[in-house]
Image (tube, grey):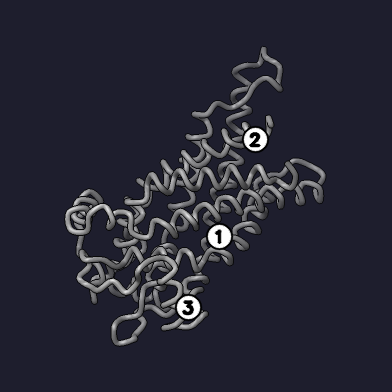
Amino acid sequence: MLWHTENAVAGIVAGFVTTTALHPLDVVRTRFQVQDGHDAVVPKYRNTANALLSIARIEGLRGLYAGLFPAVLGSSISWGLYFYLYNTTKSWNRRWRGEDLGAGLHLISATEAGALVCLVTNPVWLAKTRLQLQGPGLGVHKPYAGFADSLQRIVKEEGWWALYKGLGPSLILVSHASLQFMAYEEGRKLALDLRRFYHSGDKKEDVCLKPSDFAILGGLSKVFATLVTYPYQVIRTRIQQRPLRDGRVKYTGIWHTSAEILKHEGATGFYKGIVPSLLKNVPASSITFLVYEMVLKLLQKQ
């Protein structure tokens, strides 16, 4: 296949599988992220297990899978487009440099791809957040009937620009994927070198990584990127909330949101929801990279 189409297909399959399997933890993470201690939007869940049980009891399966369609759509588009653009920009940078890429150019390639994906998918993530913050368990009416209705109502009530609420922190969060891909690529090279060292008697081209290696590297790279960039995920979720009934917007931008969190919640407020986030995203990342590498290998044999 030309122009890294196989990378896009592998990314789409990987994104679909992981998002569908682990979506309830994404709902929990989003709800924890907006618990700001005043003007409560969601109930006060004690921990991740309590949140899952409470949502299941009050809202049923639909509550645990609120916003699933935009999550699957956004994830599939994001991973497919990201892997496609990332491998394309890597090829361009490799031709420009005429050598293997190091950590710096892996970071640049991932950042270029991430910024483009961010511009395409922000409205989808906005709709997902809004859908995850409504339901009978939240004590508010459900203003949105579904994905398409949420986009239409947001545009009608808040204007076209509202579809890009949270774009600022989203662009900053491009660094999350950039750091993860840099860590994954560098870890991949190190793991391959170690395998070649321990199998020095074999031909160099016969030594390759195992599926378990891809899963471990995918998980570890996600932990690294999450710990560094998580505060911006909280900021983005707060900004993307639906305006209050009187039309007020609780959080107006990155600096205002950061100041409010620090004032009312302290530094720990920037890490609300990190436990369900890691519980969802670390295995999701392991599965994503494992599925991606396996599907890519299968497609390249065609």
Q: Say the numbered circle drawn on residue 94.
A: none
In which image quadrant can residue 149 be found? bottom left
207 vs 158, nearest the viewer: 158
In which image quadrant can residue 257 be found? bottom left
Say whether marks 1 and 2 touch (CB < 8 Å): no
Q: Is residue 91 left or right of residue 279?
A: right
Q: Is residue 246 left or right of residue 151?
A: left
How many marks are shown on the rendered structure?
A: 3
Give coordinates of residue 46: x percent, y percent.
Answer: 19, 56
211 vs 109, nearest the viewer: 211
Residue type at numbered disc 1: Val
Give coordinates of residue 154: x percent, y percent.
Answer: 43, 77
Name the residue beneath numbered marker 2: 299
Mark 1 or mark 3: whose residue is earlier in sequence = 3
The quarter of the image holding the N terminus is: top right
Q: Which residue is found at the position 24% from the left and 51% from the top? A: 52
Residue type at numbered disc 3: Ala
Say whether marks 3 and 2 touch (CB < 8 Å): no
Q: Say the numbered circle drawn on residue 174.
A: 1
Q: Which residue is found at the position 54% from the left and 63% from the top? A: 121
